[in-house]
Image (cartoon, coloured by chain):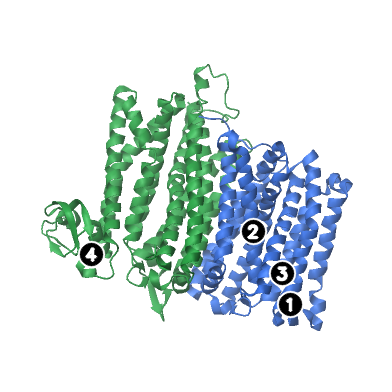
Amino acid sequence: MENVLPLIFMGIMGFALLVYVILDGYDLGIGLLLPLATDEEKDIMIASIGPFWDANETWLVLGVGVLLIGFPAAYAMVLTALYLPVTIMLSGLILRGVAFDFRVKANAKHKHLWNRAFALGSGIAAAAQGWMLGSYITGLSPGIMNTGFSCLIALTMPALYVVLGAGWLMIKCEDALFDKAARWGRNAMPLMGLALLAISVSTPIVSSTIAERWFTLPNLIGLAPIPLTTVVAFFSVYWVLYKAEIAHAGYAWLVMAGTILICIMATLGLAYSLYPYVVLDQLTVWESAAAPQSLKFALWGVALAVPAIMVYTVFVYSVFRGKASALNYGQDE
Amino acid sequence: MSTLDAIDLARIQFALNISFHILFPAISIGLAWILLFFRLTYTMTGNQLWEYAYYFWVKIFALTFAIGVVSGVTMSFQFGTNWPGFIEKAGNIAGPLLGYEVLTAFFLEATFLGVMLFGKQRVSNRTHLFSSAMVAIGTAISAFWILSLNSWMQTPQGHEIIEGIFYPVSWWQIVFNPSFPYRLAHMLNASLLTSAFLIAGVSAWRTVRQVDGPATLAVLKTGVVLAAVLSPVQVILGDLHGLNTLEYQPAKIAAIEGLWHTESGAPLTLFGFPDEDQRKTHYALKIPKAASVILTHTIDGELMGLDEFEGHHPPVAFVFWSFRVMVGVGFLMIAVSWWAAWSIFRKGLASALVLRALSWMTFAGWVATLAGWYVTEVGRQPWLISGLLKAADVVAPHSSATVAGTLIGYGLLYAFLLISYIGTLRYLSTKPAASLSIQNAASNPPHDRPPAARP
């Protein structure tokens, strides 16, 4: 049991971060797309994420929280190493989160400024997250190659969010905005492909452990479904975005579903590459795990709360299903 | 600035972040319950005033909550970016407590909040009430866990230390450590008081500006009654908390009182200028024996002075003054709320002077809450975990320049947000009240009444 506990927490952390990338990914993506829309469309785009973004962002807190609970040593090491990108990401998230509320409540003549702050915050947060992913994959070690790689992911990661955001808009919106979303998604696909390719190619180069794991014989065949599924999903998404008649025939959800599948495959691939390390080639799951009595105490909460959270999430999404309409708190005092 | 090294900067940065953060939960914890009260009253009486009150204040709640969430995300990272050693050494205890905060409460708020804020037209009145109640309960549970961790750092127990690492022995003792019940009660009450003065202050301001409707008066009365009842309760809770601190953290009490030497029948210093170099308080205005009477309930009780803790007691002047600001604002709150209550319930109307006073006190809760937290947090220094772990031993190895740079960034961002927040509150309060339409023969009723209003 004591050996399994850290693995359970590792699994929950991976799950939380995956859900975070998908859920906050689409609302960050909408933030990135905001400057491209008309004023009326901006309102609809924001309304489509209104009831969700708060809960979406909380998955990040859960992911980091589980890192803290389960692997205090890794938490300390990772966050110390990522001090600057974390600070930059937080500023972006703060700016975005508050702009969301201020834009409708503050003086109407400042609304366009808050729209800009919303887009800027989303862009900063998305790029900083890409930077963090890049540094994390290269084992948090300095060097010009690693910095260059982090820059590359920082520039391309937002494209994934844009595709997710476009997919979300195609579910929640109609008419001109629907067509625009398809075009935005299509334009972001090559950059997203570059990000996936860069991560897939660079990890085996950075670590020989990873190279050996993927490119020796029985493994290569056994693991083939991961890259193959990714490639199939990638081109399916591109196809739906490209062929207006398919999207209009009620298959627009395939964009979101396909991109989510890509995220899941990328997470599985990354998990396989890194295991058993929490920090590549430096700290393993067991070296950095918290005391068993702490993990046991926390597990009660996790076992009760995480399923409950998932039920609430489904409930909230079902309450707000269907096409987005303008957000409304009701009347004034 | 050359005297500021990385540790001081890390401290200031953490203090800035947590000070900015606490402003918003301090409102949202209390306001969530007040909003629930508005909704329940409407459901039970069918009086539309309460529905109007809810709609106005839920917008301010949403804004407040959003800033609280985003600045709270910062906190979950800053333990690692600023104090990695704290998590390495005490992660076994801090981790699960912080984890429970996130799990049981944050999610409850963040998920039900969507329904509470935007779901009014989409769900039944009952489901909406339930969601609002869950948000209110969630904010309180959130406070429960985070204050449990904070209190454990003040009065640690239930753990063992092996090779410098903390291990839990009894979770019950850790969660319910000696200072926790007092701190929890004091903070929850502080949050209700902060919200009470906020709603009373904004309503008073609207009345002065003559943009008030009938609902504004209802909110004003709610705020004044709440403030008049809770402000004396806060004095009692604070006194109990102080006695607990005397038992477990006497150095903090000595700094609060500006008591340099251990004394029997110690005087109470009302005002003065503590001087740590000369280890005396200049121009001290003292009441003989009063400190001993208040803290030990005997006239000749002995109080430990700062000389017992030389080299490891908190900065005296800062704690001394923060305490006086907190207590001063506290007593001002009692005076203003009682005066307002007397004026409203005797004459049926608040006088212009009372309205002015209330609107000046709109953010009084913020001042008192921050000052109170400075007393307790700075009063714990130089320790991070009282008596066991010093902040200086766990600080991250960033250069002063890095920390100073990000500190300035945070400072500018927070200043901008605070100005925007208060500006928006002012803007929302300047619009004529929608409840004015009730007077005009209710030509514009709200679109969703509850199914049947009971008499």
* Residue type, numbered disc 4: Asp
Q: What distance separates the C-alpha of mark 3 from that of mark 2?
A: 15 Å
Asked if disc 2 and disc 1 are in contact, CB closer than 8 Å, the reply is no
Q: Nearer the viewer, residue A241 or A152?
A: A152
- Amino acid type at circle 1 is Pro
Residue B405, position as x, y percentages in the image: 50, 60
Which numbered mark, 4 or 3, is in the foreground of this view? 4
Q: Residue furthest top?
A: B441
Chain name for mark 3: A
- In this orientation, does residue A9 appear? yes
Q: Which residue is mark 2?
A: A20
Which chain can be seen in blue?
A
Residue at position x 63%, y 61% in the image: A129
Closest to the observer, B252 or A116: A116
Report the chain shown in green.
B
- Residue flagged by tag 2: what amino acid is it? Tyr
Q: Are marks 4 and 3 on the same chain?
A: no
Give the quadrant of residue B116.
top right
Instruction: Report which residue position mark 4 lands on.
Output: B277
Which of disc 2 and disc 3 is earlier in sequence? 2
Observer-side mark, 3 or 1, equals 1
Cα distance between the residues tagged 3 and 1 = 15 Å
Can residue B39 be seen here?
no
Which residue is the site of mark 1? Answer: A204
Q: Amino acid at mark 3?
A: Leu
